[in-house]
Image (tube, helix red, strand yellow):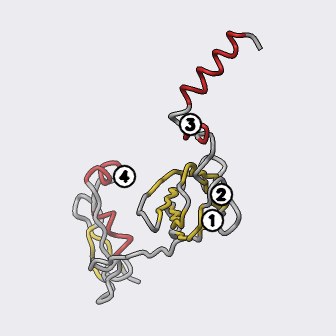
Amino acid sequence: MTAPTRFVLRLAALLCAPFPNLAFAQTQMTGETAGTVRDGQGAIIVSTAIRVANIATGERRTTVTDRSGDYALTFLPPGVYELTVSSPGFATARKTLRVSTSQITTVGVVLSVANTSFEVTVTDTPPLIQSDGPQLATQLEAETVTNLPLPTRNFLQLALPLVASTVRGNMPTAADGETENVTD
C-alpha cells in the first residue's frame, strides 16, 4: 500500500471510531406485512382501506390496495398488530398478526358482503280504484278536447260512449238540441 492510501484508511478509522452504530445502520430492525384482499368469489377488491395498529404502543399505519388488490405496509417495528380491512359494501375484517424483524408477514384477507337492509316508507295515498260504486270519470284537458276529431264539436259526444249503456231515455246528441232515444 502506498502512503496516501494508508493515510486515508487511518483517517477513516479515526473518524468512525466515535460512532460505532454507523456500522450497524445497514441492519434492518423492522418488519413488513403484505397480502391480497379478495371477495368471497375470489375476485380482487381494489382501493380497500388497510390499517394496522400496534397493540402495545397504539401506533397506527394505513394504506389502500392497488389495482391488483395487493397491499404492503413496510418499516413496522416488531410486535403484535391488529389488521383492519374495510371496503364499501363489504363487512369489515379484523385479524391479529405478529410482525418480526426482517420478515414479511403475509396476510390474505377475504371480505364478505355486508348485510344490507332497506327501509320502505309507505305513505297513505288515495286508492287508484274506486271501490264504493260503479262510477267512471275521466278528466280531459282543454287542448285534448280541442284536438279531437269531433264532427259536431259537441263535447257531449265524448261522454256518450261511456254512459250509453247506463242511460235510458232521451239524451241530447247534436249541437242544435236534437235528442235521440237511447236504450240498451
| Pointer 1 local density, CA inside 10 Å: few below 14, some 14–19, many at least 20 | some
Q: For the residues carrying marks 2 and 4, which lies nearer the camera in this image?
A: 2
Q: Are marks 1 and 3 in contact (CB under 8 Å)?
A: no
Label 4, label 1: how far apart the Cα atoms are: 68 Å
- Closer to the chain start, of discs 2 and 3, is 3
Q: Quadrant of the N terminus?
A: top right
* 16 in relation to 163, above or below: above
Element under disc 2: strand
Q: Position of residue 50 (x, y in %)?
A: 52, 57
Left or right of residue 154: residue 109 = right
- For the point 42% across and 58% down, the residue is 59
The residue sitting at the right extreme is 1
The residue sitting at the left extreme is 177
Amino acid type of disc 1?
Val
Which residue is the site of mark 4? 148
Q: Are marks 1 and 2 in contact (CB under 8 Å)?
A: yes
Q: Are marks 2 and 3 in contact (CB under 8 Å)?
A: no
Which residue is the site of mark 1? 109
Left or right of residue 42: residue 64 = left
Q: Which mark is residue 35?
A: 2
* 82 in relation to 63, above or below: below
Q: Position of residue 68 (x, y in %)?
A: 67, 49
Amino acid type of disc 4?
Leu
* 133 in relation to 128, above or below: below
Q: Position of residue 26 (x, y in %)?
A: 62, 40
Q: Is 60 in front, or is 111?
A: 60
- For the point 59% across and 67% down, the residue is 97
Q: Are marks 4 and 1 in contact (CB under 8 Å)?
A: no
Q: Which mark is residue 22?
A: 3
